[in-house]
């Protein structure tokens, strides 16, 4: 038992119960009882990582998530993230976090990553980065795909938090382990194809509200299309770059 992670999970589950969240989890038997594995998760909301660790508790395991450095720099969340042994990612020096993740995998840990790297505003799968595949290859461990649907209703990019009692249904599917193979680009393609099929399968049994912001355009919802969302991301990145380039006042 881990002295910090275990009670944090208990606290999280209490919060989930107070929120009335209704979890439907399938495939949790695909989480290995021992040994390292890359846990690859789709990214639709800020609370994804709190839900993605639930299937691992079937085998009493813990997931070490890779998260942006800013979360670790925060006075409140930083100490918690470090105590839970998550892995900080400094995007200006990504090699350090990559090597730390590989070391954890070789040591038999489960490492959680988001192949899309950022939240998908369209709630469709964005292009995948190759990091998950490269880590699996270097560490010699499988990739376990996890797809979450409904988390975007709780708190997602560009929309208000809904952290009260919403009784939101959240579906989670865990896929069969994908054994690593070269090249990393082909492994990445297979991972995305697998997770795409899993996402479509979860969506079939989920009740969607026509026009709702959290429903993909493809399903008659109000979310932007993938192309529109990518353009929004590009514009936002340009604005951030412009702000960083502005000279600071003396």
Image: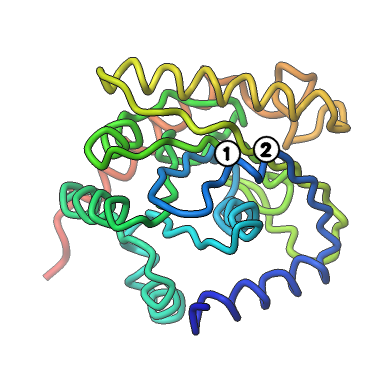
Q: Do labels 1 and 2 touch, CB within 8 Å? A: yes
Of all residues, the one furthest to the left in this rendering is: 250
Residue 109 percent coordinates (x, y): 38, 57
Say which mark, if any, is on residue 173.
2
Type of colouring: rainbow
> Which of the 4 quarters of the picture holds residue 78?
bottom left
> Which of the 4 quarters of the picture holds residue 29?
top right
Secondary element under disc 1, as helix, strand or loop, is: strand
- Count of picture labels: 2
Horizontally, residue 112 falls left or right of residue 103, namely right
Residue 214 percent coordinates (x, y): 73, 37
Say which residue appears at 38% left-offset and 54% top-offset.
66
Horizontally, residue 120 falls left or right of residue 97, namely right
Residue 200 percent coordinates (x, y): 70, 21
Say which residue appears at 30% left-offset and 18% top-offset.
185
Q: Nearer the viewer, residue 125 or 53?
A: 53
Is residue 67 visible in the rendered image? The answer is no
Horizontally, residue 204 falls left or right of residue 59, namely right
- Vertical order, 126 against 39 (above or below): above
Residue marked by disc 1: 146
10 Å neighbourhood of mark 2: few (<14), some, or many (≥20)? many
10 Å neighbourhood of mark 1: few (<14), some, or many (≥20)? many
Say which residue appears at 67% left-offset and 44% top-offset.
152
Secondary element under disc 2, as helix, strand or loop, is: strand
> Which of the 4 quarters of the picture holds residue 89?
bottom left
Residue 128 percent coordinates (x, y): 40, 27
Of all residues, the one furthest to the front in this rendering is: 34
Say which residue appears at 39% left-offset and 80% top-offset.
79
> Sequence-wise, which precedes: disc 1 or disc 2?
1
Q: CA distance from mark 1 to mark 2?
A: 6 Å
- Vertical order, 250 against 58 (above or below): below
């Amino acid at each position: 038992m881990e002295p910090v992670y275990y009670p944090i999970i208990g606290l999280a589950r209490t919060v989930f119960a107070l929120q009335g969240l209704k979890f439907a989890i399938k495939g949790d038997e695909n989480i290995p009882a021992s040994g390292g594995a890359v846990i690859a998760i789709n990214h639709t909301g800020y609370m994804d990582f709190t839900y993605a660790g639930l299937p691992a508790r079937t085998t009493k395991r813990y997931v070490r998530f890779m998260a942006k450095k800013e979360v670790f720099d925060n006075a409140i969340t930083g100490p918690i993230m470090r105590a839970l042994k998550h892995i900080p990612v400094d995007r200006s020096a990504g090699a350090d976090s990559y090597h730390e993740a590989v070391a954890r995998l070789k040591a038999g840990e489960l490492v959680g990553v988001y192949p899309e790297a950022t939240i998908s505003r369209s709630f469709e799968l964005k292009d995948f980065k190759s990091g998950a595949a490269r880590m699996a290859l270097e560490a010699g461990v499988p990739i376990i795909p996890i797809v979450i649907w409904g988390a975007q209703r709780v708190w997602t990019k560009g929309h208000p938090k809904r952290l009260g009692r919403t009784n939101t249904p959240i579906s989670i599917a865990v896929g069969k382990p994908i054994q690593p193979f070269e090249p990393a680009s082909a492994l990445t393609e297979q991972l995305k194809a697998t997770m795409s099929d899993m996402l479509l399968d979860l969506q079939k049994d989920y009740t969607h509200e026509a026009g709702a912001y959290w429903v993909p355009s493809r399903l008659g919802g109000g979310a932007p299309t993938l192309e529109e969302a990518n353009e929004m991301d590009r514009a936002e990145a340009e604005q951030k770059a412009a702000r960083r380039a502005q000279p600071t006042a003396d």
